[in-house]
Image (cartoon, helix red, strand yellow):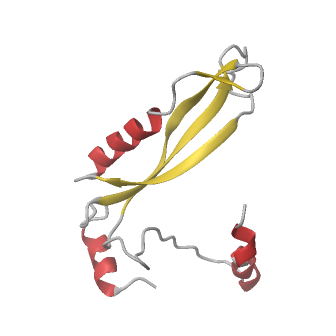
């Protein structure tokens, strides 16, 4: 449970991080450049959603910095054993939230509120340590 000062800060200004940090997520879509379906809105693609920490004085600059970071890895390259021209395409920022506490062990960087969940649903979300290994 968050401590009182952090929650008080959120109630005052939810868009500004008092510590200058933001957590941001963005999407990158993998394409073969010559694929005729690369821009088909109904086609399916491999997508990575990356979550990063961004140091910025305000939400707008955190957004711009996230876009800059996300687009750094979008240059075309030769992929796979056949050297096919491929590319990661930036598809936008999906989340941008201020961090309200100094970053250290145990600092709260994300929180969510869910309502109306059964005990069964709540417990189904909990995972064992071994579940996190990839």
Residue sitting at 46 percent across and 38 percent down?
Answer: 70
User: For this view, does 84 lie left or right of residue 69?
Assistant: right
Where is residue 121? Give x, y as percent.
73, 77
Image vertical order of residue 43 relative to residue 93, above or below: above
User: Which corner quadrant of the image does residue 109 belong to?
Assistant: bottom left
Where is residue 73? Give x, y as percent.
50, 33
Q: How many marks do you count on the picture?
A: 0
Q: Residue 127: tell me if it is visible.
A: no
Q: Quadrant of the C terminus?
A: bottom right
Residue sitting at 32 percent across and 60 percent down?
Answer: 21
User: For this view, does 103 lie left or right of residue 25?
Assistant: left
Residue sitting at 56 percent across and 29 percent down?
Answer: 89
Camera-side residue of 15 and 129 = 129
User: Which corner quadrant of the image does residue 60 belong to?
Assistant: top left
Camera-side residue of 22 and 16 = 22
Camera-side residue of 120 and 27 = 27
Farthest-out residue, front: 81
Image vertical order of residue 86 relative to residue 112, above or below: above
Image vertical order of residue 131 relative to residue 91, above or below: below
Image vertical order of residue 32 relative to residue 129, above or below: above
Where is residue 19? Give x, y as percent.
25, 66
Where is residue 64? Give x, y as percent.
33, 40
Q: Residue 84: tell me if it is visible.
A: yes
């Amino acid at each position: 449970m968050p401590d009182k000062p952090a929650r008080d800060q959120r109630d005052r200004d939810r868009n500004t991080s008092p510590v200058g940090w933001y957590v941001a997520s963005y999407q990158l879509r993998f394409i073969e450049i010559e694929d005729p379906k690369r821009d088909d809105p109904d086609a399916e693609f491999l997508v990575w959603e990356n979550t990063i920490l961004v140091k910025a004085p305000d939400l707008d600059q955190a957004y711009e910095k996230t876009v800059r970071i996300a687009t750094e890895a979008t240059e075309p390259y030769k992929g796979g054993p056949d050297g096919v021209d491929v590319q990661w395409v930036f598809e936008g920022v999906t989340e941008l939230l201020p961090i309200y506490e100094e970053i250290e062990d145990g600092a709260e960087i994300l929180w969510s509120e869910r309502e109306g969940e059964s005990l069964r649903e709540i417990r189904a979300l909990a995972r064992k340590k071994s579940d996190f290994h990839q």
